[in-house]
Amino acid sequence: MSWESKGKRGEAPFRGHPPSSVDEHICNDIRSRLADDPGIDSSDIKVRVEDGQVLLEGSVPSEIARQMAEIVAYEAEGVRGVENSLVVRARKRFDTPLPLNRHDDGNPIEPGSGN
């Protein structure tokens, strides 16, 4: 016999074999929500749940994605708290920055000269 539970906010009920624990169900729900969110690259997000406490680990491309992942985790049913240990990946820059002491025209900045 398959196991079934009510979905949240109009979602389809969960069908299939029951999760081995409530924490596993929460973890699967969060992973699914993260994967379905177009604003979050969840490819490097690890989710762990213990007694309803969620731990997010890994990396994301931006601070906004980091915050969004935490919100998504809090929205899952049964979550009692979220520890967000996600780090923002460094951006890769291919252009060479200008030296700090030069204007766009290449002239050095002279203190007090009004440049």
Image (cartoon, grey):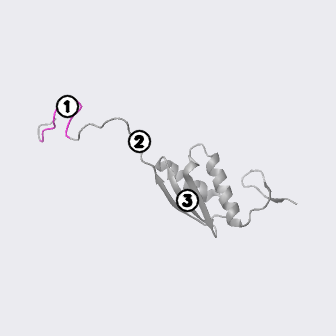
Residue 97 forms part of the magenta stretch: no
Q: How many marks?
A: 3
Circle 3 SS class: strand
Find residue 27 and report its horizontal and vertical position in percent. 65, 60
Circle 2 SS class: loop
Circle 1 SS class: loop
Badge 1 crowding class, 10 Å Cα cut-off, few under 14, some 14 to 19, many 20 or more, is: few
Label 2 sits on what residue type? Answer: Lys
Find residue 47 and report its horizontal and vertical position in percent. 59, 59
Q: Which of pointers 3 and 2 indicates the residue nearer the eye?
A: 2
Residue 105 forms part of the magenta stretch: yes
Seen as rendered, the residue at the extreme right is: 1
Residue with the mark numbered 1: 106
Residue with the mark numbered 2: 92
Question: Which one is nearer the viewer's eye here, 59 or 11?
Answer: 59
- Distance, label 3 to label 2, CA atoms, is 24 Å
Q: Residue at x 11, y 41 (%)?
A: 112
**In which quadrant will I find the N terminus?**
bottom right
Position of 83 compared to 9: left or right? left
Find residue 52 and report its horizontal and vertical position in percent. 63, 67
Considering only order in the chain, which callout, 2 or 1, is on the residue closer to the N terminus? 2
Residue with the mark numbered 3: 56
Badge 3 crowding class, 10 Å Cα cut-off, few under 14, some 14 to 19, many 20 or more, is: many
Q: Which residues are magenta?
A: 101-111
